[in-house]
Image: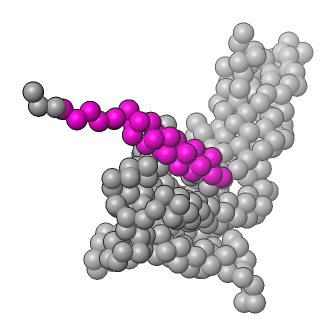
Amino acid sequence: MAQVQRRSYGSRTTKNESTRSTIYKNLIADIYADKILSHLDVGFEKNLFLASLRNLSDHGNPVRFNNFAYCMREIISIILAKYSNDDDIKNCSWYEEPSDTEVTRVQRVTYAICGGMDVEYVKNSILEIEEYEEDIFSETLSSFNKKYRELNKFTHVRSPKHFDISDIKCEELSKAVLKLTSDIVSLIDECRREIQWKIDEQISDTVIDASVQTTMDGLDILSTHGMVDYIYLDEYSVKDITSQSIEVVGSGTAYCILEWGSGSDMRKGDGASIETDFPYSFKAHVSLSNLDDIVIPENHMDIDNSSWLE
């Protein structure tokens, strides 16, 4: 009877699982992995990221590291797509159609940072960059391109340098790729936040003026006549910068006068009035080229009168 050689698959699987667990645990615990995950949605996006980490434990795959770098490059594209789609970018006044594609990476990054705002307007009027000062906008685009090229080179297999590498080298380079990916995303976020913060600073008084001048829904059902005496703006912030406008949301307290009865009733003493206050919220649209031009559309400023209707 022929003898069948018995192979110990169990021990090999345990070893691979152990190695997989070590590589995965080291990388998933990395601070840069956490920063990347914070930008990804539950489901496909997070699953893609985690699958790319697990792929690094596939010792039979000599291009496991290159595949990982490729996935990280795709994740950057996924994150950039959250800020816009191609139609948004094409609707911007600064958009110029490239010769070889519809939208370039630089155009995507520009939109992610400042939406449809003209770049020179952002530099001169929003960031107020003087001639001798560091240009954060240009520096961001330059650093993005440099880091993206560095990441991109890891996706190619044109020499043995990054092909079929050891576990130690694989983990070392993968950590470098995680940092590159995180740095690229952080560059965009930081420049975007700086611009939004500068806008917040410059529109404070205009937002208050627009709030006072806007009719508030919700007062008319409480009394014969309702008017806003004055408002207190608790908070506001730039929610988004689109191809059409800067979207600002905010909330505060409206101090109101409610009257019951006609003008004649009030003069005769048959009417009544009280002073009270309500929380309110609003959504405003600010011009991309003039921060003093703020519009709060009809039905975009609401009084919370729920306490009166309970």
Q: Position of residue 34 (x, y in %)?
A: 61, 48
- Residue 12 in the magenta stretch? The answer is yes
The residue at the point 74 percent across, 39 percent down is 251
Determine whether, in the image, residue 221 is placed left or right of residue 150.
Answer: right
- Residue 97 in the magenta stretch? The answer is no
The residue at the point 73 percent across, 47 percent down is 236
Seen in the picture, residue 46 relative to 117 is either above or below; the reply is above
Residues rendered magenta in the picture: 4-31
- Is 72 or 111 nearer to us in this picture? 72
Taken as a whole, is the magenta stretch helix, strand or loop?
A: helix
* Res 57 seen here: yes
Find residue 289 and report its image quarter. Answer: bottom right
Which residue occupies the extreme bottom position in the image?
132
Which residue occupies the extreme top position in the image?
310
Seen in the picture, residue 173 relative to 295 is either above or below; the reply is below
Q: Where is residue 73 in the image (x, y as percent from the top left)?
A: 43, 62
* Placement of the N terminus among the 4 image quadrants: top left
Find residue 234 and report its image quarter. Answer: top right
- Is 81 or 57 nearer to us in this picture? 57
Seen in the picture, residue 286 relative to 161 is either above or below; the reply is above
